[in-house]
Each structure stands twice: as C-alpha cells, then as structure tokens.
Amino acid sequence: MDLRISALRIDYGADQPGLAGVDLDIAAGERVAIIGPSGAGKTSLLRCLGTALRPSSGNIEIGRVQPWQISRAALRSLRSRIGTVHQAPPLPPRQRVVTATLAGRLGCWPAWKSLLSLLVPQDIAGARTALERVDLQDKLFERCDQLSGGQLQRVGIARVLYQAPALILADEPVSALDPSLADHTLAVLCDDARNRGATLIASLHAVELALARFPRIVGVRDGRIAFDKPASAVSEDDLKSLYASERVTPGEPGATHVVTPRVSATGLPCC
Amino acid sequence: MLLNRDMRDPALTQRLLLSMLALMLAWPIGHVAGVNPAALVEPANLRVVSSFVAGFWPLAHDSFFLGLLGDAVLQTLAIATVGTLLALLIAIPLAIGSTAALSVTAIGPSPSGLWRPALRQVLRALTLLLRGVPELVWALLFVRVFGLGPSAAVLALALTYGGMLAKVFGEILDSADRRPAKAILAAGGSRLDALMYGLLPVAAAELLSYTVYRWECALRAAVVMGLVGAGGLGQLMDQSMKAFNGGEIASILTAFLLLVLFADALSGLLRRWMANTRKDGRWRALNGWAFGLIAALACLASWRHIGLDLGALFGDRAGSDIARFLREFLPPAHDATLLAKIGSGAVETLATSLVGTALAALVGIALALPAAGRTGAVAKTLTRFVLNLLRAVPELVWATITVLAAGLGPFAGALALALHTGGVLGRLYAEALENAPPAAEAALKLSGAPRALAFLYGALPEVAPQWLAYTLYRWEINIRMAAVMGFVGAGGLGQLLYYELSLFRLDNACSVICAMLALALVVDQVSAILRRKMG
Amino acid sequence: MLTHFRRHALRGLAAFAFASLALPAFAQMKELKVSAIPDEAPTELQRKFAPLGKYLEKEIGMPVSFVPVTDYAGVVEALAAKRIDMAWLGGFTFVQAKLRTGGTAIPLVQRAEDEKFTSRFITADPAIKSFADLKGKTFAFGSPSSTSGHLMPRYFLMQAGLTPEKDFKTVAFSGAHDATVAFVASGRADAGVLNASVWDKLVESGKVDTSKVRVFTTTPAYFDYNWTVRGDLDPAVVKKLRDAFLKLDPTNPEHKEIMALQRATRFVPTKPENYHSIEQAAHAAGLLR
C-alpha cells in the first residue's frame, strides 16, 4: 500500500508540539524507519497514518484513498488492511493468547465466525503459526495476564502477523525486548513485510537497529522531517543534529519530556 | 500427531460441557419459572397493561385521597426514623460488646479469663441471626404477633437493621485507631472511659454517616414492608393495586419517588456536613447541637406519630403472647405433604431468582452500553433516566404490573426482578465500562473490527469479572426477593408462607421460613464459590 | 480541629439519644376499637363504617375508632391479642377467632342476608361453563382466610371432585373480593370466586363489565359474616352494642343510610352454633386441623 502525505499538521495546543507540516511519500512494499528524539512527533505521525488521529490540516492518502473523506464502511475496510504494533500492547489481561492473536482478523472474518471464536477459537493453526514466528507457540492457551511485558509485546506482533495487513505500522515495536530478541523480532517483521510485499513503517529509538534493518530512514524533529534518505546515506552528522537537544545539556540524558497526545477513549482526537 | 495434541484447546471440553449444562438447565429452569415471552406480546395482555398504565393519568388528587397519602408519607417517614432509632439501641450494645478494640485481654495477660472473648463470639452470632432474616419476613411475623400497622414494620426494621448496624459498627470500631483507647485501658481506665474518650471521638463521624445512610435504606424498606400490611405508603399502595386504581397508584409512586429523592438529598447534605472539617469551631459546635436537637425532635415526633406501645410490647401480657406464639411456631412442622410443597416452592423460587437475574443482566447490558456514553450524549442522558426509574420502583411494585403483562405465576415475579435489578445492574455495568481501560477496544477498531466485535473482544474481557461479580451479588439479593414475591401472586415460597400464616399454621410457616433462610444461605455460598472461581 | 468537631458531633449524638429516651407516657384512651376483615378495599371499608361508627358512638356513649387492616389474619390476631374490641368477621375468620381466643369470642349479630350467604364463580372465558371446564386454568380465590372467597368455594369444588392445587394451572389469592373481579376482568386469572353480596354491589354500581365477566355458577347457601366482640369486654357494653345493632330500622331514614352501606335489610342475633358447619367444612377442606 502506498502512502502520500502533504503539509500534514497536528495542533495539540500551545504547550504540546504536534506535527508542523510533514510531506512524505512512501511506495508500496517500502520499509521505512522513523527515528528522532522523544517528543519529535513520531507517534503522532504513525497515529495519523493509522487513521487513529485526524490531522488538523493537510492531506493524507493511504492506498490512494483519503481516509477522512470516505464512508464509515469504506474506512473500516481500509483499517482492516492496516495493522498496528502498539508500544504498549493493548490486550485485555483475562483474554487468552490465542483469542488475542485471532482478534487480528476481526475486520475480515464474517460475524458468525468471530462470535463463535469467542467460545471455540476458529483458527488455532493460524494463531499458532503466527506465534511460532515470535517464539511464543507454547503460550498459545495461556492468559495474557500470565505473560511478561516482553512476551505481551510479541503477542501484539503476532496479532499483526496473523492479520497480514498491506500496511504495518509499528510504534516502538521492540522497546520491551532485550537487544538480541529485539533484533530477531524486528527481522521477523521485516521479513514478513518483504515476503508479502507489504509496506512497513516503524518508529524506533534504537538507531543501530533502524540502520541495520531498514533501507530508508526518516529523521523527525520538532514535528518536521529533518532528513529522509537511504540508510547507507545517513551520516554521523545527520544523527548528531537530529538528537542535538539531547546533547545540549550533557548533565540531563533524558532531558526530553514524553508527550502524550490528548485523545479520547475511542482513539480519536477530542479537539 | 504431536502437532495435533498441541493444537487442541485444553479449555474446549470444559467450555462445551458448561455450555451444554447451561442449555440443559435453562430448559427446566425456564419451565419451572413459567417463562412465556409470547404472553408479553399477546394483544389481550398488551391491552390490559396499556389500559392500566393509561389509568395512571390523571393522578388521583381528590382531597380525601391526598389526606390518606399525606398520612401514609408521614407514617413511612416515622417508621423509618423510629425503626432506625430502635436499631441503634440494639446495635450499640452489640457492637460495643463484640468489638475487639476494647479488649483488655488484647493488651496483655489479664485475670478476667476467657469469658469475654466468648461473649464477643456469642454477640457476633446473634448479630448474624438478626440480619439473616429479611425484614419483610420479620414484618410478616410481627403483623401476626403484635397486631396491625406500623409497629410491625418498626420492630422488623429494628431487628434486621440492628443486626446490620451492629456488624458495620463493629467493623468501624475494629478498624478505628485503637491507640487512644488502648492507652486509656493500659492506664487502668474502665472500658466505658476507653469507649467515650478513646474510641468514639475517632469513629463518631463514620458511625453517624453510616447511620444516616441506613435511615435512607430504611425508608425504602418501610415502603416495601407496607405491602405486607405493615402500614405507611406501602400499605396504601397495596390497597390501590388490589383495587386496580391506576390514578392512585401513580400518585403514590410519585409521592414515593419524591420521598426517596428527599431522603437522598437530606442524607447527602448531612454526610457532606459531617465530612466538612474546615468550618469555624464555634459554628461546628452549634451545628452539632442543632443536628442533635433536630434529630431528637424528629425521633420524638415520629415516635408520637406511630404510637408504638412499648408498654404493651414489654408489659405483663407480652411475655405470655410471645410464649404462646413461640409454642405454636416451634418446632417447625415436617410432615411429608408440607415438605413436598416446600420443595416445589423452593425450586420455583430458585428458578424465579435465576431467570430474573439472567434477564436483569440482559436488560443491564442493553442499557449499560448507551448509559456509558457509547451512543452519544442524548442516549446517555435518556438511558440514565430510564435506569434510575427502573431502580427506584421496588420489585414488589413492578410485580403488580408484570402480573398483568405475563399473567399470574413465577414468570411475572421473574420479570419484576428483571426490571428493578436491570436498573441496578445497568448503572453498575455502565460505571465499570466507563472506568475500564479503553485501549484494547480502540486498537481493535483501528484494525477494522466492527464496533460490536471490538466491544466483545476488547472491552468485555476487561469488565467481565466485575460485571459477573455484580450479577452474582444481585442474585443473592434476588433469591431473598423471589422468596417474598409470592405475596403478590408470583408463586414460590412466598405464596406458601402467606397461605400458611393466613391459616394460623405457624409451625408450617416456621418450616417455610427455615427453607427461605436455607435457600438464601445456599445461594450465598454458591455465589461466593463462583466469584472466587471467576476472580 | 478534627477532634473538636468530633466532640461536638458526639455531644449532638448524646442530645439525640437523651431526647429520644425521654419518651412521652402513653395516655390510654377509653374507646371502642373496631376493625373489619379487608374483604374490600380498606378505603371503601372506612367509608362504609363512618356513619355506623357515629351511630354506635352515640348509642354506647364512648368514642369509636376504626382500625384499618389489610390482612384477614391480622384482624383475627388483633382480636385475640386484645388490640381491637370488635370486628366484622367472616364465617371462617370467626371460627379462627373463636379457636384463637379459646372459645371466648362472642358473635353478636349478623345481617339477615348472612344466614343464607352464597359465593359466585365468575369468568371472562366463554369456554368455561361448569366446574369441569376449570381444569388446567388459572383460578383466583380472595384471601386464604375468606369464607366466601376461599373456604366454602374450595369446599364445594372438592365436593365436585376438584382439588385446586392439582387441577388448576395456577392458584392465586387476590386478597379481596373486588380484587378477584379485577383479576378476572383483566385476564390475570381465567376464573375466580367471590362473595355474592360484593358481586351484586359491583354489578349494581356498574363497576364491572357484565358483557365480559359473567357468573357461571353459584354455591349453595351457608352462614357467613357477623359482628364479633372479644369475650372479656364489659358485658354492659356488649349488651349496648347488640341492642344498638338490633335497633337499626330501615324505615328510619337516618338508619337507612347506615344499613344501605352495610348492605343489610336488618340485623339479627347470632350464636356460635351457626358456624359449626363452616368449621366442619374447614376441616374437610384441610384448612383447619
């Protein structure tokens, strides 16, 4: 699925930076890493692409359609082709891993199948295959509240693998994993996207992982795109200026503050 | 082969068995409870209900009736007030006697031995017995033992609420800061000193606040007890309902709702006043005195209004009256015909409570979704209003309407339970839903899941344990309500009790009451086990 | 500050407790307390009693008050517990009262009509024409303690070979005669039974739609209602009461109103023996043991 964004703005209000005019074109099947300091607008950008956030102004086209111009049914069908890996996997604690994984296809399953699946999981084999790819096949019938944070994050990835969407959006998909597992899991996501010809856009804090796994790197800073180049072309200087504010005051390594966008319970913006 | 074993859902057998069991039980339970949805849409029944409800307007407002209504409102207020007052008199010694906060033995070795802890256990058992029997059953008995009208309701309230207050007071005293009391006891002060100067100053506000809350509950209970002939608004409502007088019923219901609102506002005001500690000391002192004085005057007026004849209650003849009553009441009868009747009554009552609670859960869910603001602000306000209305009308009053819609029998009782409990559960469900984390459901919607499925997969698992706990808790209440629903023609143990009491077969009545208690205890246990399992 | 407040709250509580303990002593008023089994709506009973109460007040020279009750058994128990002095009882409630007072309750007078009282079986279902058609239907009695609304109809049903609990789909107790009519008219019950006198009154006053609800059978006659006083009442007062009732004369316009409300042509003396057959019927029907 290809993406086309122009002059995209998100205004949260005076004290919270959003997006201050972003232009970005991504072709179908591309794998793009978004990097940048905390609060730069990575999550906002991903939420816009995932139709969770309606931009204040500007144009956004996902797979040649403008998500905010189409009917509800069409939006739902568009959304069923977008899979999101969340930073904190939103899984109900009492749900079983198999059900949580199968929930990835609620958008395309017929209603009877989804309903029956609540009682009798409908595609155990499919769920198992997806979980196998993130090494969780033995947790198939466990409840989510029995899993560690890292395992939960991988269940969230397994759900998206099972969904097999044309566009994968991943917001810090491996932040809760140790480095070797993080690399492996990212490889699984990238392989999946490459094999199916799906578009993959991931925001990452770990720059080395981004450079190693993604052909194209987009640096975001202060709600704007700082650079957009092939991974091989990203220089030390690019990174230095991208993370400049974090180095201005050496005494405070985490001098940035995390910005939580004001959104309503439905995931749609309240303003 | 290995793969096959790995892929079999280990919960599947259990789930299928449970589903089958539920389906298999649903049929006989529905049959016993006389479930007949077709009766609800039968044109004849619809006509009856609509003409009955149409009779609600205009409200009855002739001066004779309004006079009766005014008296009944005052009487209900008086019943609740005097009942709570007597309950306090029962509860205070029980609570003080059973609290461990005044224990001398707890401080260190003392010569007084073991009898005080033993006394505490006896008092706790007495408390349990007092609140174990529903006030409605006490009321029914007292109507017979001590004669007519509000006195019966007052005594019934005094006993049940005495038990409840004693339990909660005991808990408040136990959990209060014990250090001041301990210090006084350790310094050789008497228990009374420890209570007055050590314990009460710490716990007084909470004790008062809970008492006021109970008074509010007593007001509703007083209305319901009137339905079995214990005076007040309920008795008037019973008369009007038997006479099928829609206008009167509507007037009484309006008066009842206003009374409940008034009590709600008053108790809210009092509790706010008690919680507010920032006022000037002198004002506070004045307020304390004023509050005490007003409460005392209210009690005095209520007492006069009811004309509760304590002299007759504890006079020379009362002893022989009660002895005569107990002789007839005990031992409980246990002949085979009676036991068979009790057995089928108990099954019918159980079925009524199950069907009623299940339907209530459905009503609750259907209303909780809009009430939690999922379908817009207008729907939210509207459903909140409907929920309040469903909740405000007592089950026994709903029963008189459902009996028209569904015909006599347990199904009408189950429907009445469903309407009232549906209102209660709807509100609780909606609150749970609003407080649940929204992320899981939002994520599913973002991946294209239809709204209903996103709810089932994302939100339901988050709230299910709470919903289930609420439902089971209401089931415990409903089994008690179903037991008395028979008074309005809804069958079960209640009708049997009414019948036996009417024929003065008190030993039979005693057996029926024992069966009610046993059934309630069994349901409490089952519900507790289920809650532990699901939790 | 907080303890200060609590001390005052405590003081308030003490004032509250003190005032509520200093209760007024109850003045025992010398008066005749009268009640009636609630075979009709209690408001109706109160309305009916008002002129009779005034008349009795004048005749016995003592205030007379009416105690409304919603429950038959409550009246019996109140008489036994001496909370009321005189009551309008049905045949069966009189038997109950007699048994519960150790045989001391005195039946004073009854209406001439009560000597041969009947019950009417009513229905709104065209298919019901006789007792046999009642099988499998829902049926409404009045109060379980009612003579004409429960005991005698049950007795006659059992003589016809019908056991209500077995042969009817649902047995309901409406609680009062006019309530039974409401049950049947509204379709809450397929059929019901009530006191002939109340039925006739409802028909006369047009309170029942006779095109819908009809009588399909009437019971044989039996003794019913009477005015009963408790046995330990001052005999002089008892005599005055009996005389007052017997003196009522329909030709006297003042009395006429009283008697019309009581639906009596005249009052006649009655005696406990009149109710033996009812007691036997109650035993036979299993309502007494």
Image (cartoon, grey):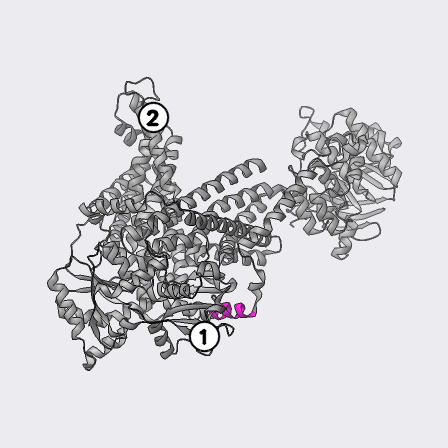
Q: Quadrant of residue B440 in the image?
A: top right
Observer-nearest of B187 and B323: B323
Inspect the magenta stretch and tell me whether residue B51 lies in it: yes
Observer-nearest of B58 and C234: C234
* Residue at which label 2 appears: B117
Inspect the magenta stretch and tell me whether residue C112 lies in it: no
Main structural element of the magenta stretch: helix, strand or loop? helix
Check residue C213 in the rendering and tell me which mark sits there, or answer none.
Answer: 1
| Mark nearer the viewer, 2 or 1 | 1
B20 relative to B170 in the view: left or right: right
Q: Position of residue A251 (x, y in %)?
A: 67, 23
The residues bearing labels 2 and 1 have C-alpha atoms spaced at a distance of 67 Å
Residue B502 is at least partly visible in this image:
yes
Specify the amino acid type for callout 2: Pro
Q: Chain of mark 1?
A: C
The magenta stretch is B43-53
Specify the amino acid type for callout 1: Val
C156 relative to A91 in the view: left or right: left
Q: Position of residue A39 (x, y in %)?
A: 70, 37
Observer-nearest of C234 and A187: C234
Q: Secondary structure at mark 2?
A: helix
